[in-house]
């Protein structure tokens, strides 16, 4: 895999201890200035103070304070603001819990975002997970037990709307006739749909792998090791070929925490509290993420690239925006440049 390009995106603080409008926009502009591939947000409709304190996707455990509100800025609205504040960086969501969204309305929203941003939108989708999203299904009156079927059908229905001037669809859950919805996406041949999915004890998700092989333009799991990426990538290739699809057209990604410093011990110290909150053990967290000095991070990423990965979504662990900027610059200068 020597010479294969590895692209990098950065998670924005649309939730977590540092979530606010100015931090979101400032971070996005800095990501673009440093020439990263993309910026990313994530998505939930319901979010509580308890979840705010235990599911950290932007920032760090140390940045949490007792007086913070559990602000979680909605993904598509946030990306629309970011689109207006940037010029070229791609705009991703990892991931939309797709069964919670009406597919016609969602197709309209996403095609509009893609058109307004000049074709910069990347759509990650997932059926949701029992641990976090089940209460959201109950709140919006969607049957959680049908989430996998809903996800597959909604993907097909949304693509029909994006591609047809007068779209019709007849499915188990969705039916519509002659739906004329504009604007159409600018992205060609379509807005890329990347498949995420809940990991089973931080292991491979067979349904997400199968869905990627059948329907996805990319695979975007979380916290997988290089060996797990290799296994998943091979399975996706096999399924895609059986479907008559080109495996080479499917992006293989991974979502990882990152804490980088010239001093590897300082990087480890800065990561420990957040990893302890998110993983069964500190060692497991260190094994599944990028923590260390630039050389150590480059070596870990080389293993991912050799395993078939072509994209990494980076969730930097930072106490404030100054530390985030320092890490993004260090990563861009001494790591990212080696994979272009």
Image (cartoon, grey):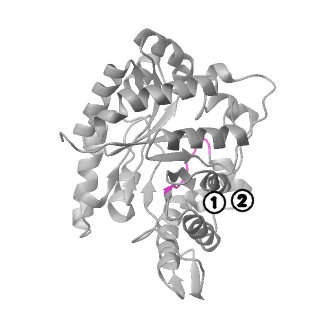
Q: Which residue is mark 1?
A: 100
Marks 1 and 2, how far apart in space? Answer: 7 Å
Q: Earlier in the sequence, mark 1 or mark 2?
A: 1
In terms of image quadrants, where is residue 64? top right
Q: Main secondary structure of the magenta part?
A: loop
Using residue 101 as the reference point, say whether residue 166 is left or right of it. left
Above or below, comparing residue 54 to residue 281 in the picture? below
Q: Position of residue 46 (x, y in %)?
A: 71, 47
Q: Is residue 314 left or right of residue 143?
A: left
Query: Could you classify mark 1 by the number of other residues whose Cα lies within 10 Å: few (under 14), some (14-19), or many (20 or more)?
Result: many
Residue 131 included in the magenta stretch of the image: yes
Q: Is residue 301 magenta?
A: no
**Residue drawn at (36%, 26%), measured in percent from left and top?**
334
Q: Residue at x 56, y 17 (%)?
A: 273
What is the span of residues highlighted in magenta in the rendered image? 123-132
Label 1 with label 2: CB-CB less than 8 Å: yes
Asked if one can make out residue 277 in the rendered structure from this viewpoint, the answer is no
Q: Residue at x 58, y 43 (%)?
A: 28
Q: Position of residue 282 (x, y in %)?
A: 46, 17
In the depicted structure, whether residue 77 falls above or below residue 47? below
Q: Give the class, few, some or many, for how many residues have Cα within 10 Å of label 2's Cα (few <14, many ≥20).
A: few
Along the viewing direction, whichever of 160 and 90 lies nearer the viewer? 90
Q: Residue at x 44, y 23 (%)?
A: 285
Residue 268 in percent (x, y) is at 46, 14
Q: Which mark is residue 140?
A: 2
Local SS, label 1: helix
Residue 156 location, x and y as percent?
46, 72
């Amino acid at each position: 895999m020597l010479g294969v390009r590895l692209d990098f995106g950065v998670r924005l603080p649309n939730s977590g201890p540092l979530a606010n409008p100015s931090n979101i926009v400032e971070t996005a502009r800095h990501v673009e200035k440093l020439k990263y591939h993309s910026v990313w947000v994530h998505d939930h409709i319901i979010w509580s103070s308890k979840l705010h304190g235990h599911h950290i996707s932007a920032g760090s455990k140390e940045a949490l304070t007792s007086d913070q509100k559990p602000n979680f800025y909605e993904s598509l609205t946030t990306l629309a603001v970011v689109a207006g504040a940037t010029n070229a960086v791609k705009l991703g969501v990892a991931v939309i819990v797709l069964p919670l969204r009406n597919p016609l309305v969602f197709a309209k929203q996403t095609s509009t975002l893609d058109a307004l941003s000049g074709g910069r939108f990347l759509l990650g989708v997932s059926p949701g997970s029992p641990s976090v999203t089940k209460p959201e299904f109950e709140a919006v009156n969607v049957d959680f037990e049908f989430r996998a079927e809903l996800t597959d059908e909604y993907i097909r229905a949304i693509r029909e709307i994006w591609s047809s001037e007068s779209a019709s669809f007849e499915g188990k859950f969705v039916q519509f006739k002659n739906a004329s919805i504009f604007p159409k996406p600018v992205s060609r041949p379509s807005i890329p749909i990347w498949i995420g999915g809940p990991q089973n004890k931080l292991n491979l998700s067979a349904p997400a792998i199968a869905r990627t092989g059948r329907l996805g333009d990319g695979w975007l799991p979380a916290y997988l090791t290089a060996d797990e990426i290799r296994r998943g990538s091979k399975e996706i290739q096999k399924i895609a070929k059986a479907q008559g699809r080109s495996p080479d057209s499917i992006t293989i990604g991974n979502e990882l925490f990152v804490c980088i410093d010239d001093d590897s011990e300082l990087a480890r110290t800065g990561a420990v509290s957040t990893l302890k909150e998110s993983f069964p053990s500190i060692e497991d967290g260190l094994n599944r993420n990028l923590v260390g000095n630039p050389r150590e991070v480059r070596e870990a990423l080389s293993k991912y690239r050799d395993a078939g990965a072509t994209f990494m979504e980076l969730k930097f662990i930072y106490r404030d925006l100054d530390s985030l900027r320092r890490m993004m610059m260090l990563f861009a200068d001494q790591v990212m440049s080696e994979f272009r």
